[in-house]
Amino acid sequence: MKYEPVIGLEVHVQLNTKSKMFCSCSTEFGAEPNKNTCPICLGMPGVLPAINREAINLAIKTALATNCKIAPFNRFARKNYFYPDLPKGYQISQYELPLAKNGHIEIVTNGKIKRIGITRVHMEEDAGKLIHGENLRSHDSSYVDMNRAGVPLMEVVSEPDIHSPEEAKEYVTRLKSILRYIEVSDCNMEEGSLRCDANVSIRPVGSKGLGIKTEVKNMNSFRFLQKALEYEIKRQIDIVEEGGKIIQETRLFNPDKGITISMRGKEEAHDYRYFPEPDLVPTEIDSTWIEDIRATLPELPDAKRKRFVKEYGLPEYDAEVITISKSIANYFENCIKLYNKPKIISNWVMGEVLRTLKDEDFEIEKYPVTPQMLTGMFNLIDNGTISGKIAKTVFEEMYKTGKSPENIVKEKGLVQITDEAEIIKVIDEIIASNPKEVADYKGGKEKLLTFFVGQVMKISKGKANPQSVNNLLKERLKNNPSLTNP
Ligand code: ADP
Ligand code: MG
Ligand code: ZN
């Protein structure tokens, strides 16, 4: 029997506000423990929360960017549970009346565009953080830091439309890209601004129903998400193949071992005793508010991707890669302003630039090779100063030193050899020292031409003009052995 994985993701995003969800404490990351706290976020009795309007603005922005319908009326709810990082004994979240529902985003897998449904977008507050023994003086105590308690979170829940670990990674990549475009969150996975829980089940290929799911928590990188899903899918298939049954539960991913382990039996919604939050009024969102926010949306990645295909004639794939972040897309367009050959630019951006850009958020602002430098190098290729091969060397130098391509070419003596007499000298040397290959070539093994080209390029340290080398080699090999000067 063949099985198909079914995956739905719950992505928690820390919103980019200055202050917390229900009080005016700072949301700054990395502050001294418990510095950013007040009676409200510490959950003291008798205090009253007040909703942060900016957090709602950012959630509306997200709902619009993910094609959701915004509810005209939403309200917060208490989700009751006990944990030492939650002093109130409940989290203020949303339940039966979330901010927005029924959206979708597009992902590209195997060259095809696919829609992943968004079930809902809602707002809530974060909990504090427990710090356990090992990094502290005493091994048998735990500490609690409440700086994170009350930080605005948004939860984006997907439909179970995802059918492989790769698609899951692609979905989170695209969602993160959108959230960064609209600047609602920095989405820094290491600092926990973007966290992801994966719900997974399997079913026989062709069947439409949903199997029993498990929920995997604690994946703070794309790699872990993919690894955890691969493990979990295989684990479930193995159980079913052996005649066992999947139990609904919450599992934890252990990145060191690459496995998921059972954490607790899955709680049901009724376990939380949700009820409307009595300390907060419901929020009404009218069309004026929505339109004001819509007016602040930038061009979104999908629209940009489509425009790049239309306006610059880029292949779909190139447009998709280049629009992954606003700053790469801007870099590309800044290059276009200086040099009007989009495909050449996209080749280099997707190749050398992205290869050397060590930033998982694809931010290119501080990148040493500026659009001026990159396009300056293209001009040197076009006017014959350097070959395409030498350009790779020039690029490496620009990346390492930040010097202009013109200076690098001058300092390193990388100017291309176009003087035919000089190239012929090298060719004749090679012909003379490889009599067997010459004979074979003349005997019909024409593939040997690449061998000769390689030898010429080696001796000229890559500086000979490849087109001339090709032409001259053919000509000299034909005239051999009566090697004559031109
Ligand atoms: P819960 O109340 O247990 O959190 P929800 O119905 O709210 O469950 O769904 C949470 C997430 O799990 C959603 O992303 C949804 O798409 C996904 N999901 C629901 N059922 C399944 C299933 N059988 N297999 C995989 N994912 C599922
Ligand atoms: Mg859940
Ligand atoms: Zn506070």
Image (cartoon, rainbow, N blue to C red):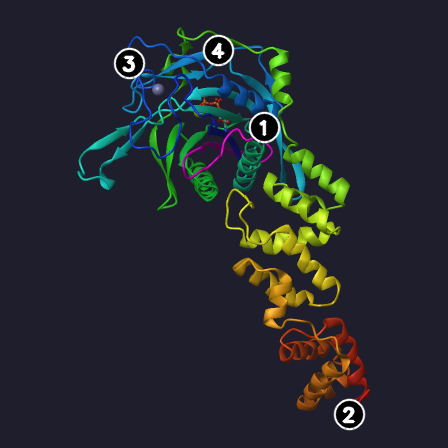
The percent coordinates of residue 237 (x first, y second) are: 46, 39
Using the rendered view, name the quadrant where residue 205 is placed: top right
Point out the frontmost of discs 1 and 4: 4
User: Is label 1 within 8 A of ligand 1 (CB to nearest ligand atom)?
Assistant: no
Whichever of labels 1 and 4 marks the residue nearer the N terminus, that label is 4
Q: Is residue 227 left or right of residue 446?
A: left
Quarter that holds the N terminus: top right
At label 4, the amino acid type is Arg
* Label 4 Cα crowd, 10 Å radius (few <14 / some 14-19 / many 20+): many
* Label 1 Cα crowd, 10 Å radius (few <14 / some 14-19 / many 20+): few
Using the rendered view, name the quadrant where residue 133 is placed: top left
Q: Is residue 70 left or right of residue 143?
A: right
- Residue 44, label in figure: 3
At label 1, the amino acid type is Lys
Whichever of labels 4 and 3 marks the residue nearer the N terminus, that label is 3
The percent coordinates of residue 255 (x first, y second) are: 38, 43
- Residue 105, label in figure: none
**Dot 1 corresponds to which residue?**
208
How far is mark 2 from mark 4, CA to CA?
Answer: 90 Å
Question: What segment is highlighted magenta in the picture?
Answer: 182-209
206 is within the stretch colored magenta: yes
**Dot 2 corresponds to which residue?**
481
User: Is label 3 within 8 A of ligand 3 (CB to nearest ligand atom)?
Assistant: no
At label 3, the amino acid type is Met
**Dot 4 corresponds to which residue?**
75
How far is mark 1 from mark 4, CA to CA?
Answer: 34 Å
